[in-house]
Image (cartoon, rainbow, N blue to C red):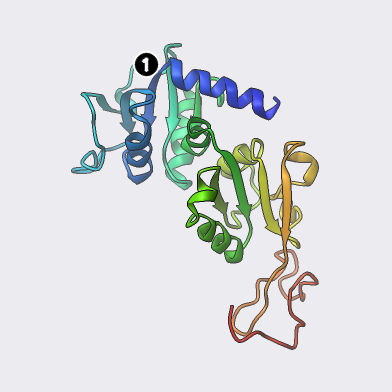
Amino acid sequence: MEKNVFKRQILEKLLNKKIVLVGAGAEAAGFYNQFSSIINIEVITANYFVKDSLSRFKLKREVITKTISELEVFNCEDYFYIIAIDFDVSCIAVEFQLEEQGLLYGSNYVYHTVATPILSEKKILLTAGDCLLDAIATGLSYFDSFTKKYYVRHYFYLGKSKYFNKMYYRLAQICDLYVMNRHMINPYGFYFDREELPQDCQVIYMATPEFRGYWPQTPIKESTVNRYHIFPHDLHPVDF
């Protein structure tokens, strides 16, 4: 589906349905506190609630809090689910549980990483690669003038499995600006080739730094000098 059409359809669902927020941690609390006045969050669910896990939620009214196994609203067309869990095994488990109930991505649920920029009416900036790219993503988040326009998200090397990296792949399919290491063009089949990104997505390639004590290698051949490094292999800068 074309990127802007998908975003518009998701926005309509977010605004017009009863929302089930899946997660009871920092990611879910942050999402609830930011958007509970905009969308109708009726249920907060998780596989388990630790003691005082809801204390970080600034609850504006009474909401239903039940574990996923206790929910009875799975396939009701009135509800739309948002998985607000940072990417880890828990996120994979929750998505599997929803799909076991017949729910489909985009039709019945999305991740908070998709819902947040759509509700904020921001463009999506995705960085993918080593800690240099993580530093860039973190640095950009300090500029209010930038974050007012862009939602920034970084992903490290997470392996080649599309199943275990659905959050990354699905965000990449609707991103507006994509920044990656120049040498990381689809290693192990993980990072997107240019033709797999949205047609109007801008791509920026970053060279890889090299200095003594830190040398990110090309994953396919870890002992091979990366030809896209910034500095000659026999030199190193004093600072990063």
**Residue 102 in sight in this render:** no
What is the residue that sits farthest to the top in this orientation? 77
Which residue is painted at 49% across and 40% down in the image? 92
Tell me residue 57's x, y (percent). 26, 38
Tell me residue 48's x, y (percent). 29, 37
The residue indicated by pointer 1 is 73
Secondary structure, mark 1, is: loop
Q: Nearer the viewer, residue 68 or 80?
A: 80
Is residue 194 positioned above or below 227 on the image?
A: above
Which residue is painted at 74% across and 64% down in the image? 220
The quarter of the picture where residue 200 lies is top right
Tell me residue 56's x, y (percent). 25, 43
The quarter of the picture where residue 37 lies is top left
Q: Quadrant of the C terminus?
A: bottom right
Q: Amino acid at mark 1?
A: Val
Which residue is painted at 39% across and 23% down in the image? 39
Tell me residue 53's x, y (percent). 24, 42
Is residue 76 positioned above or below 183 on the image?
A: above
